[in-house]
Image (tube, rainbow, N blue to C red):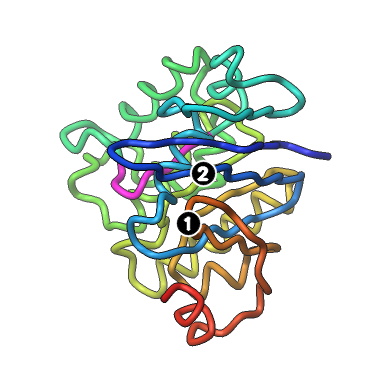
């Protein structure tokens, strides 16, 4: 089942950043987006999650036109930016309550269990490890009951063990019928992706998911 289809996405600031980027992602897929720093990966993900508006193109999510009705983004998409948007002074539970109230849904205990957050619900976010903060962020991203997770450099700042734990959560999410689009520079994350797309000169092209890091570096020169 096709979850998202993006066609000819355009975005410019002082100069063009996206020049007709197109992609599709289906149920159970994890799509990795790679490319040089500053090539537009974060801009593309922000557009696909509804955070910023494109200058042109089309995005449909679960066969609904997201540009015509921007509520489609909040209905289906969970977004994890590079920097966790958590309120450090609040507890984990209060952060999650805020997310779920915005989504107009009751706090989902099954997600708390799945993310391994039961033991830290009453702890302040400021006391948590980077990996645990990522878990809280993912639980919040799932507040909409999302069919699609969009992750921007999700392993940034995490140690090896935390990266492995998060990668297992991503695998479980896609195995349960969800879909993921992630921007990444991590070989470990590339290895869990079903497809890799290179963003170069404002457009996306599919590359071999088994590509070596040296080959990828040469392509990005």
Residue at disc 1, secondary structure = loop
Residue 26 horizontal/vertical position (percent): 76, 45
Q: Nearer the viewer, residue 202 or 113?
A: 202
**In this figure, which residue is indicated by the disc labeled 1?**
201
The residue stretch that appears in magenta: 78-84
Please give left or right for residue 39 compared with residue 71 in the image. Answer: left
Residue 192 x/y as whole percent: 62, 67
In the image, which disc is placed on residue 19? 2
Q: Position of residue 108 (x, y in %)?
A: 54, 28
- Image location (x, y in percent) of residue 60: 68, 27
Compared with 197, 203 (above or below) is above
The question of residue 79 being in magenta is answered with yes
Q: Quadrant of the C terminus?
A: bottom left
Residue 117 seen by the camera: yes
* Tag 1–tag 2 contact (CB < 8 Å): yes
Q: Which image quadrant for residue 11?
A: top left
**Residue at x 73% of width, y 53% of height:** 175
Q: Secondary structure at mark 2?
A: strand
């Amino acid at each position: 089942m096709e979850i998202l289809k993006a066609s000819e996405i355009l975005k410019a600031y002082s100069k063009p950043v996206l020049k007709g980027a197109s992609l599709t992602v289906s149920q159970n897929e994890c799509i990795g987006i790679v490319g040089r720093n500053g090539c537009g990966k974060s801009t593309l993900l922000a557009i696909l999650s509804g955070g910023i508006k494109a200058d042109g193109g089309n995005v449909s999510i679960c066969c609904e036109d997201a540009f015509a009705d921007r509520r489609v983004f909040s209905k289906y998409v969970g977004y994890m930016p590079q920097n966790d948007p958590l309120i450090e002074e609040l507890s984990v539970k209060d952060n999650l309550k805020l997310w779920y109230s915005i989504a107009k849904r009751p706090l989902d205990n099954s997600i708390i269990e799945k993310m391994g957050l039961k033991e830290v619900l009453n702890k302040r976010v400021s006391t948590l490890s980077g990996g645990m903060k990522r878990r809280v962020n993912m639980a919040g991203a799932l507040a909409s009951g999302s069919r699609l997770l969009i992750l921007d450099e999700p392993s940034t700042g995490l140690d090896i063990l935390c990266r492995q734990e998060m990668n297992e959560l991503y695998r479980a999410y896609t195995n349960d019928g969800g879909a993921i689009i992630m921007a990444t520079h991590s070989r470990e994350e590339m290895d869990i992706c079903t497809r890799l797309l290179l963003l170069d000169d404002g457009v996306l092209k599919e590359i071999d998911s088994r590509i070596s890091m040296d080959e990828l570096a040469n392509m990005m020169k």
